[in-house]
Image (spheres, rainbow, N blue to C red):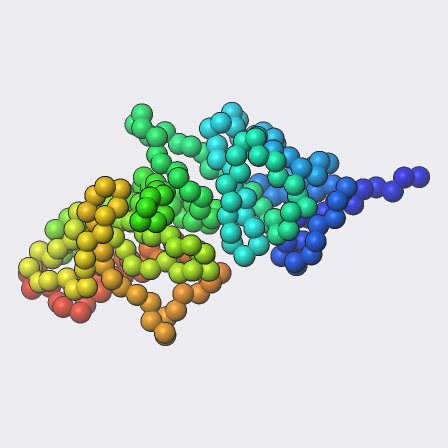
Amino acid sequence: MSQETEIIDLEAFSREGRPVPKEKKYRIKIDRDFYVVDNECMTGRELLVLAKKTPPEKYQLNLKLRGGKVEPISLDEQVCFTKPGIEKFMTLPLDQTEGQEQRRQFALLDEDIEFLKSLGLQWETLSESTGQWVVIYDYPVCPGYNVDRVTVAIKVEPGYPRTQLDMAYFLPALSRKDGKQIGATSIQQIDGKQFQRWSRHRTGQNPWREGVDNFGTHMSLVSYWFRQEFEKKPNAVPA
């Protein structure tokens, strides 16, 4: 009697740092669903079809490796499951809004995509000479400023999520209605526009926590910075 082929759980093997053997069945994770496949290698197109993301041309496939690194996978690119460190695959719809394509120029972690979607706001990922940026539109600002909503840009440094998210950039430039100056600001060119940079940083008592902090926690900090400005220098006029 032939022995049943072993099923290898890629996510478990990756987390344990174990090498993945050849000529087995493989349990792979795409977004939040699991699939068992017989093939040792599959193309990006085949993986998208497997996950019922059709037509595959309307989706971007990303591969998440142990340690947090994310790699984009093209439709005709072949992925072999014996590659060290494969945790899971993530899909990203190439959305259309008001007849204009939202730019998705680099991949994000699925937890960050879930957070951005939860905002109910438009957002984009941009790659340019100044770095990689996540841009969020119409982000709410607390009372006391010249606007009640602003475009926010966050720079994604190489190595994220091991490398921290830091500072925030705003368009239009924020000012206080009471005329008091906002400290530690400068200008940064992003997407051909002049954004206002707020130099606000974590402290030794509140460092970046790898595995805990992400876009969700960073944007909570940004919202706190809006309020903190008036805690440091109380509002001189009614908000």
> Between residues 196 and 215, which one lies in front from this camera angle?
196
Query: In the orientation shown, which residue stands out farthest toward the front?
Result: 129
User: Measuring 83% from the left and 41% from the top, which residue is drawn there?
Assistant: 4
| Residue 223 seen in this snapshot | yes
User: Measuring 72% from the left and 47% from the top, which residue is drawn there?
Assistant: 8
Query: In the orientation shown, which residue stands out farthest toward the bottom?
Result: 205
Viewed as shown, does residue 173 lie left or right of 57? Answer: left
Viewed as shown, does residue 170 lie left or right of 145? Answer: right
Q: Is residue 202 above or below residue 16?
A: below
Q: Is residue 203 above or below residue 48?
A: below
Quarter location, residue 29: top right
Viewed as shown, does residue 41 lie left or right of 57? Answer: right
Query: Picture coordinates of residue 169 (x, y %)?
Result: 25, 53
Query: Picture coordinates of residue 175 (x, y %)?
Result: 12, 55
Query: In the orientation shown, which residue stands out farthest toward the right?
Result: 1
Query: Picture coordinates of residue 64 (x, y %)?
Result: 54, 48
Question: If the image is split into quadrants, where does the C terminus sit?
Answer: bottom left
Query: Picture coordinates of residue 93 (x, y %)?
Result: 45, 34
> Between residues 19 and 226, which one lies in front from this camera angle?
19
> Between residues 132 and 206, which one lies in front from this camera angle?
132
Quarter location, residue 238: bottom left
User: Measuring 70% from the left and 53% from the top, which residue is drawn there?
Assistant: 19
| Residue 51 seen in this snapshot | no
User: Measuring 21% from the left and 49% from the top, which residue is drawn there?
Assistant: 195
Question: If the image is split into quadrants, where does the N terminus sit?
Answer: top right
